[in-house]
Image (cartoon, helix red, strand yellow):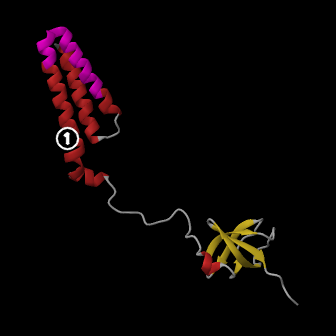
């Protein structure tokens, strides 16, 4: 009797903690404790006691699932622990519009060897130089776009 009671008590406590601290591991261990309590109930009390323990374990599981997935998300506690705001940031800069940038002049912000950073209308873009090594401050012409970067070439100076 004591073994069955302790297994059910530990199972209920772990399942209750799982409701407040989701993650699955505590609920799994609590479920295994309830299962062990059912098995122990069958061995100690026979079929009648085992059936009662099984029904009790299923009721505990159903109540737990209902509390965790229906009641808890609507509670004050859930609102404190969930993020209500959205993040509007971007991990990558905006891709340049091909038609708007091809043929335009840009200035190298970093050394392009052959990749680096250029500015166009005050915005910084990743760039690839077809001309090879390009020094900081060099005037370049955009000849194409490639995924997330501009393809540039050095402007030939005419005398």
The residue identified by callout 1 is 66
Regarding residue 61, the answer to whether it shows in the image is yes
Q: At which x and y percent is residue 152?
A: 73, 73
Residue at horizontal 27%, vertical 22%? 33
From this view, report whether residue 83 is shown above or below residue 51: below
105 part of magenta stretch: no
In the picture, residue 8 is in which quadrant?
A: top left
Magenta stretch encompasses residue 40: yes
**Residue 131's spot in the image, x, y percent?**
81, 71
Q: Which residue is found at the position 50% from the left and 65% from the top?
A: 90
Q: Position of 20 compared to 124: left or right?
A: left
Task: Tell me the SS state at disc 1.
Answer: helix
Q: Is residue 108 visible?
A: no
Q: Position of residue 134 (x, y in %)?
A: 79, 71
Q: Position of residue 147 (x, y in %)?
A: 62, 65
Looking at the rendered structure, the number of numbered marks drawn on it comes to 1
Placement of 144 over or under 52, stated as above or below: below
Residue 31 lies left or right of residue 50; in this view the side is right
In the picture, measured across the screen, residue 1 lies left or right of residue 137, that is: left
Give, as a single range, the part of the protein colored magenta: 30-51
The quarter in which the C terminus is drawn is: bottom right
């Amino acid at each position: 009797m004591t073994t069955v009671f302790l297994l059910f008590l530990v199972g209920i406590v772990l399942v209750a903690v799982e409701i407040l601290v989701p993650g699955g591991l505590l609920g799994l261990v609590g479920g295994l404790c309830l299962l062990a309590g059912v098995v122990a109930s069958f061995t100690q009390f026979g079929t009648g006691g085992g059936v009662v323990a099984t029904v009790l374990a299923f009721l505990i599981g159903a109540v737990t699932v209902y509390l965790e997935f229906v009641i808890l998300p609507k509670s004050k506690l859930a609102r404190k622990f969930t993020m209500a705001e959205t993040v509007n940031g971007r991990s990558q800069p905006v891709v340049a519009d091909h038609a708007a940038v091809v043929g335009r002049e840009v200035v190298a912000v970093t050394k392009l060897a052959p990749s680096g950073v250029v500015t166009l209308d005050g915005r910084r873009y990743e760039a690839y130089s077809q001309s090879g090594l390009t020094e900081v401050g060099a005037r370049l012409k955009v000849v194409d776009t490639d995924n997330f970067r501009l393809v540039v070439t050095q402007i030939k100076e005419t005398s």
